Amino acid sequence: MLMRPFSMHLDFRRGDLTPRDRTNIRKLSDMRGMFFNAEAELLALEKENPIIYSFQERVFPEENGYLQLAVTTIHPGKIGDEYFMTKRHYHKRPDTSEVYLGLEGEGWLLMQTVGGDFESIPLKPGVAAYIPPYWGHRMVNTGSTPFIFFAAFPGDAGHNYGDIERAGFVKILIEENGKPLFIDNPRWKKIE
Ligand code: M6P
Ligand code: ZN
């Protein structure tokens, strides 16, 4: 069936995509074991299990030729010294790209290949980042306000959480003396 052209509304400040097909909420309990400081993670879980981020999606056919669209809001906050962040993923079809456009607040895009090659790009409103094929990706909110960004990626890209889950990310982003600082993740191991 021929899809008709359309437009939609993006509320940059609220992170709302209208119309949308679904809203996903990721609480700390959905990210167990992903923050470096396991003790701080457990404490925060028991205390309030905060919402770390949410994302609103327009869902299209999972086929070559279409695009999937999303607006994500990462709340400000930290677990221990580590900033709130997304889970991170590779694409199920690893040879697909993605574009992230900063709408509100500030943060960093962390990217990594299976071999352990690492790149990072600071994002703020008006900055768009291109994530090429084969780069796993994670967004981190390093500011004190919600960090909101728009994402577009191929219809058939899919999400692969497992490969990074096993290996972790090669670097983590923590706050030191009020500023973001990249440190090596001692838990990271290359998958042989
Ligand atoms: C962006 C897009 C989505 C992704 C979401 C949350 O909106 O990249 O595809 O699902 O961020 O990231 P993650 O799936 O890693 O939790
Ligand atoms: Zn992606």
Image (cartoon, rainbow, N blue to C red):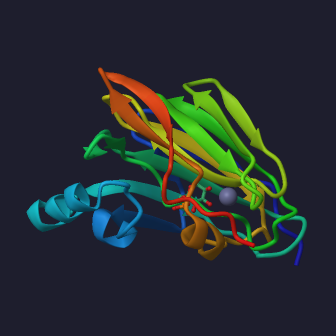
Question: In the image shown, does 135 or 61 lie closer to the viewer?
Answer: 135
| Residue 83 figure quarter | top left
Task: Using residue 109 as the reference point, say whether residue 73 is left or right of it.
Answer: left
Relative to 128, does residue 188 appear above or below in the rendering? below
Q: Please identify the quadrant where the C terminus is shown.
A: bottom right
Say whether residue 143 is left or right of residue 91. Answer: left
Establish if 67 lies above or below 171: below
Where residue 26 appears, as percent x and y from the top left, is 38, 64
Q: Nearer the viewer, residue 164 or 10?
A: 164
* Residue 123 picture location, percent across and down: 58, 29
Residue 174, picture quadrant:
top left
Q: Is 68 above or below relative to 171?
A: below
Residue 71 coordinates in the image, percent (x, y): 54, 49
Answer with the quadrant where ligand 1 appears in the image. bottom right
The outermost residue toward the left is 47
Residue 103 visible at all? yes
Residue nearest the viewer, comparing 169 with 144? 169
The N terminus sits in image quarter: bottom right
In percent of width and height, residue 134 lies at 81, 58
Q: Kindly tell me whether residue 105 is visible in this rendering.
A: no
All told, the count of numbered labels is 0
Q: Residue at x 45, y 29 (%)?
A: 181
Identify the residue shown where x is 65% and y is 48%.
151
Q: Nearer the viewer, residue 184 or 79?
A: 184
Q: Residue at x 69, y 64 (%)?
A: 90
The answer to which quarter of the image holds residue 59 is bottom right
Which residue is painted at 37% across and 28% down in the image?
A: 143
